[in-house]
Structure formats: C-alpha cells, structure tokens
Image (cartoon, helix red, strand yellow):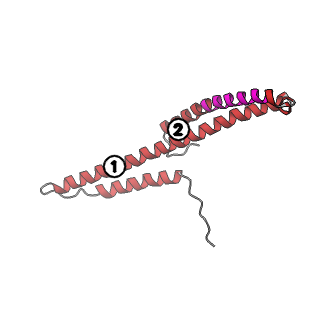
Amino acid sequence: MKPAHHSPEKIQGAIDVIVDGGVKGGAAGLVAGAISHFVAQKYSPKYRSLTVQFRTFIQLAFVITGACWVIDNNLLAYERQISREQRELRIKKMEDLANDYYTFASQPGGKKPAGTVSQAVEDLKATEKIATSASVAPAQSSSE
C-alpha cells in the first residue's frame, strides 16, 4: 500500500532514480570487479586456487555494492530535492497569503478577509503534519 502523501509523480521519480543509479552503480562495480579480478588472477596464487563459484560471488559483491552505493546516494539527493521544493512551495504560499492579506487590509474601507489567514495556516499545518509524519524521527538519547 502506498502512503497517501506520495504523489504518483514523486513515486515514479524515485523509481527512475533507483533504476538509473542501479545501472550506473552496477556498471561501475563491474568495472572495479573486473580490474580487481585480473590483478588478483595475475598476482595472487590464493585467488587462482579459489573455485569459480566463489570468484563469481566476489565479482557479484562488487556489482551489488556499487549499485547499492549509487542508488542510496542518488535517492538521498532526490529526497533532498523534493524536500527543498516542498519548503519553497510552503514559503511561497505564506508570502502570497501575506501579500493578499495586506492588499485587502490597505484598501480604503477594506477589511481583512474573514478566515483567509487562519484557513491558509491550517492548510499549511496539515501539509507540514503529512511531511513530518513521512520523515524518520531522530533517535532520542537518554541522559541518565
């Protein structure tokens, strides 16, 4: 079940980042594994005495580690980008709301719009609750 606060565009963006990072990281791991294989094959009699299955396992470890490393870095960067965009959107909403409020209040005979500020603040609080519930709470340290 998908969390309600994730839009399909954000999920698809994360999937794209994961696939792209997996391919690039796997390729980099494959290159590093191949180089290490040929160097070890040439200079290490112990490596040459390993079974083919174990050498394959070692090479797969290079590929998987490279893929996981790049996926993790790319996904963290994507999450920071999404967080930055959401923060900028909240700030823009508040600035627009403040501009509207002061525009109405500064007009001759104008009075502040009823409920506009409070409704916008409630909307932003609801958005903030959704965003904070999705993030991982930091571990609390006990000071005993």
Residue at which label 2 appears:
11
Q: Secondary structure at mark 1?
A: helix
Q: Position of residue 48 (x, y in %)?
A: 84, 29
Q: CA distance from mark 1 to mark 2?
A: 24 Å
Amino acid tagged 1: Lys
Q: Secondary structure at mark 2?
A: helix
- Above or below, 141 against 67 in this view is below
Which residues are the magenta region? 24-40
Q: Could you tell me which residue is drawn at 73 percent across and 31 percent down?
A: 36
Q: Could you tell me which residue is drawn at 72 percent across and 27 percent down?
A: 34
- Above or below, 110 against 10 in this view is below
Task: Please identify the quadrant where the N terminus is shown.
Answer: top right
Q: Which one is earlier in the sequence, the residue at label 1 or at label 2?
A: 2
Q: Could you tell me which residue is drawn at 58 percent across and 35 percent down?
A: 18
Specify the quadrant of the image occupied by residue 31.
Answer: top right
Q: Residue furthest front?
A: 43
Query: Was residue 27 drawn as part of the magenta stretch in this picture?
Result: yes
- Above or below, 83 against 17 in this view is below
Q: Main secondary structure of the magenta part?
A: helix
Specify the quadrant of the image occupied by residue 30.
Answer: top right
Residue at which label 1 appears:
93
